[in-house]
Image (spheres, helix red, strand yellow):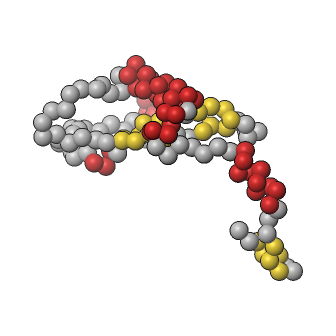
Amino acid sequence: MRTRSKSGFRQPLDRLNLHATLSLSEDPKSYKTALLDPNWAAAMQEEYSALTENNTWQLVPRPSNTNIVFGKWVFPQKFHSDGTLSRYKARWVCRGYSQQHGIDYDATFSPVVKPSTIRTVLSL
């Protein structure tokens, strides 16, 4: 990366770039590489147990001639305000755009209320 100054072009200090690249570890890009690190494996187990305990979804046998909604693991790292690592966080993200209305789902719910409705209910 080059930045412009009035006297010409200059590059940022290399020692600062080296520190930034060494201090941050990369997020895993695949499920297999995440399983090799015990921190990411624990984060994935925590996410899976939260999904099953909250009855978000259930594992069932695949019925014939149905559409399967695929997903993938996303592995972001969470940091404190001072830049230190807070925790490893794993999320299962489904690809909802592959669902078909009437086949995979029947209705959607969006909890949206107009402010005028809230004022009317509160005035009663």
Identified at 57% across, 43% down, the residue is 27
Q: Locate residue 21, reporting x and y percent.
A: 70, 51
Which corner quadrant of the image does residue 31 belong to? top left
Lateral position of residue 97 relative to residue 51, left or right: left
Identified at 53% across, 43% down, the residue is 28
Residue at the limit of the structure toward the top, as seen here:
53
Q: Locate residue 51, reporting x and y percent.
A: 40, 26
**Residue 94 sits above or below residue 45 on the image:** below
Quadrant of the frame with the N terminus: bottom right
Q: How many marks?
A: 0
Which corner quadrant of the image does residue 17 belong to? bottom right
* Residue 65 seen from this side: yes
Lateral position of residue 78 relative to residue 107, left or right: right
Identified at 74% across, 71% down, the residue is 2
Identified at 52% across, 26% down, the residue is 42
Q: Locate residue 52, reporting x and y percent.
A: 38, 22
Lateral position of residue 23 relative to residue 92, left or right: right
